[in-house]
Image: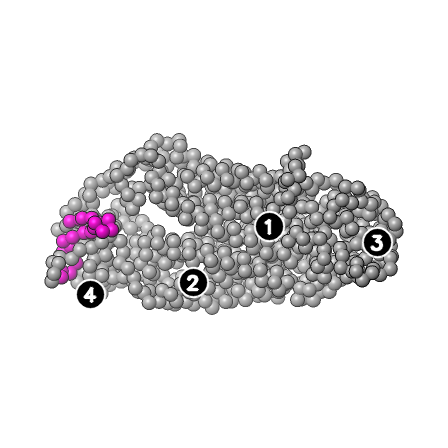
Amino acid sequence: MAMPQNSTRENGFCFTQSLDFSCPSPRPGEAGRTLGAVSGRDGCSTPLSNGITSSGAPSPSDSCAQPLCTPTPAEEETPYEEGIKYVSAEGEELACGWGGFTPGCLQLCNTSKGVLFFLCVASFLQGMIVNGFINTVITSIERRFDLRSYQSGLIASSYDIAACVCLTFVSYFGGNGHKPRWLGWGVLVMGLGSLLFALPHFTTGQYKAHSAAEVGVCGGNQSLPCSQAASSLSGYSFVFMLGQFLHGMGATPLYTLGVTYLDENVKTNYSPVYIAVFYTAAILGPAAGYLVGGMFLNIYTEIGREIDIAPENTLWVGAWWIGFLGAGAASLLISIPILGYPQRLPGSQRYIVMRVSEAHQLKDGSHKKASDPDFGKTVKDLPRSVLLLLKNPTFIFLCLAGATEATLIAGMSTFGPKFLESQFSLSASEAATFFGYLVVPAGGGGTFLGGFLVNKFKLRCSGIIKLCLLCTVSSLLAIFVFFIHCPNMPMAGVTQMYNGSALPGGHLNLTAACNAQCGCLQETYSPVCGTDGIMYYSPCHAGCKRASENLRNGKKVYHECSCIDKTLLSGPGSAEPGKCTSSCAKRPLLLCFMFVVILFTFLSSIPALTATLRCVSDRQRSFALGIQWIVVRTLGGIPGPIAFGSMIDKSCLLWQDQCGEQGSCYVYQNSAMSRYTLVAGLVYKVLGTTFFIVACLLYKPPPPESAPGSLDASENGTSDLQEHKPSLPAEEDI
């Protein structure tokens, strides 16, 4: 039986080219022990764990054979004294610590589980900051610093711009360098970005909310000034953009080098599970960001200062900056242990020897260039590395499939709450909370389940791509649920006339005889729900003349509303602030199938990532992930929200009027919104399915004899050498 061979110094380790097993077969009791040591001291080797012996010529590499075969006294005291002793050809230090400071207590964390823990904390913080806090506080920042919508859009996009700029450099040089140091410095930079993001709160004066005169009831409206001088605080948008840019720079190594570092230091079969746990932490981060960020927004931004307005008031600005201070400090702390990890974990060498190559085989054989130990260490190899990846059709189509899935994820994460808000007539906070409860179990569960399935069934690269295809087809079928929609709640002057008759599509008529004398302003949008079950644009448009507070629940109630049908007992109708509650019977069905769409979309994420790692050579894994992230961001993450937003805007019924200029959309037509969401979802899901099919058809696995360490090349995944060696000490690390 052929043993793993590696005569190069790839990955910094030196192994003998062949091992001599000239001893007779082992005694029955010794058959289940570890992989035997090579001959060197007594000319006799320990047999393989399955009891099969082998013989071969001695290694010609004497310089490598000597330390490999003759252990030092310190090595003899290790738990693996009877196994192969892997040593770095460059005398590499594998202890955990900082420089010469490597205390023994730190070595308890110098395992794959220890690395996973710290990387999970880092990814959790990244998700909480970028996808949680930023999305939660962006409205408060606009209000506090007088920012326009396009400025807040630039702030949000700065993260992706930074990532795209840094990905090639970080993934190429970091992939061939000391990954934990790149990761640690990246998390540190991300922490500095968070502290910088919170800085404007401390460099500006106190925020003073001027409570205007009562605006809203009939006869109480005042003219709102249209021409306001530009505030000097808007210049802080550049500080926020710089903070987001640092967030993007710092997070770049996390999802490229972090993934490959985990993949290199665990068994091939366990790699998807580790990566799934890592990404699950990244998905739970935004959920925590929404919850914690929302809690901080209920605290006034000037802590300790008395204020006479409530959080529901449009002038309220919450303590948006607290989360960034805490997350920034936590990022700085977590970067310290990550910086202390060695370039390779102790014992990881055995996985390098046993790894079965599944890289796509190019017809011209140019993929073999990536196996050169000196390949990729200089800038002049960068164009060749890019060319090798571009010539790999499986990698290209996996990137395109990832871009289509990223478009859906980015679009739905941005506009999913808005979809629920419109369909079920919810408030913005209720819709965000509802969507969070939907995404966390579906997204987090799907991510972890995807990695678990790859490990459970020991799937090879082609089998993994087929699993991705199955998940995409399942979500494609489930997305037809968007044929279903909930009817719009009736709104006077928008969806129907004040007298209940149908309103011509695209035409607004907010003025009626009942409110003609009120002088209502269209700029003042504050919907109320009348006792007749109809929504009105504002208390003024409902003809309400008086407001009071409900003593039972503390909510405001508007009385003497002339536009609301009078009742025999109470006279003129009344209204309460907010939208009317929807009693849509289709809500459970819509939520159920939305859960299925999200579940299967995230279910394919880890398998697709694993397939990307498998279809390229080992030395190109980090760089391949970097290129894939660039493709996913430029073709999916950045244009995704724009594409979905433009589609959804076509279904708008009522636009905001900002002194004659069109603002955001107040009311959507539910049927049109569902229809456009269905079209966008179908287009991207069909494209994703097509790309996975092409990637599966074009994938060309290596021939059986070229897979070092494999016992057979069967497609069912039983050819991993690790699966035939259950007694390896490596099993103890999992």
Classify residue 682 as left or right of residue 566: right
In the structure shown, which secondary structural element does the residue marked by tag 3 occupy?
loop
Is residue 263 inside the magenta stretch?
no
Q: Nearer the viewer, mark 4 or mark 1?
A: 1
Of tags 4 and 3, which is closer to the observer? Answer: 3
Q: Which residue is mark 4?
A: 501
User: Quarter of the image holding residue 532?
Assistant: bottom left
Residue 414 percent coordinates (x, y): 42, 53
- Front residue of this view, candidates 664 and 436: 436
Position of residue 129 in the picture relative to residue 46 (left or right): left
- Residue 711: image location, x then y, percent: 74, 63
Q: Is residue 98 left or right of residue 45?
A: left
**Residue farthest toward the front in the current orientation of the protein:** 29
Q: Is there a contact, CB below 8 Å, between mark 2 and mark 3?
A: no
Q: Which residue is mark 3?
A: 45
In the rendered image, the vertical position of residue 47 relative to residue 238, given as above or below: below
- Sequence order check, earlier mark of 4 and 1: 1
Residue plotted at (44% across, 51% down): 287
Residue highlighted by disc 1: 259
For marks 2 and 3, the one nearer the N-term is 3
Above or below residue 452? Residue 190 is: above
Q: Are marks 4 and 1 in contact (CB under 8 Å)?
A: no
Q: Position of residue 402 (x, y in %)?
A: 54, 57
Circle nearer the N terminus (3, 1): 3
Q: Quadrant of the N terminus?
A: bottom right
* Distance between mark 2 and mark 4 Cα atoms: 34 Å
Q: Residues within 10 Å of mark 4 (few under 14, many from 20)?
A: few
Q: Secondary structure at mark 1?
A: helix
Q: Which residues are magenta?
A: 546-567
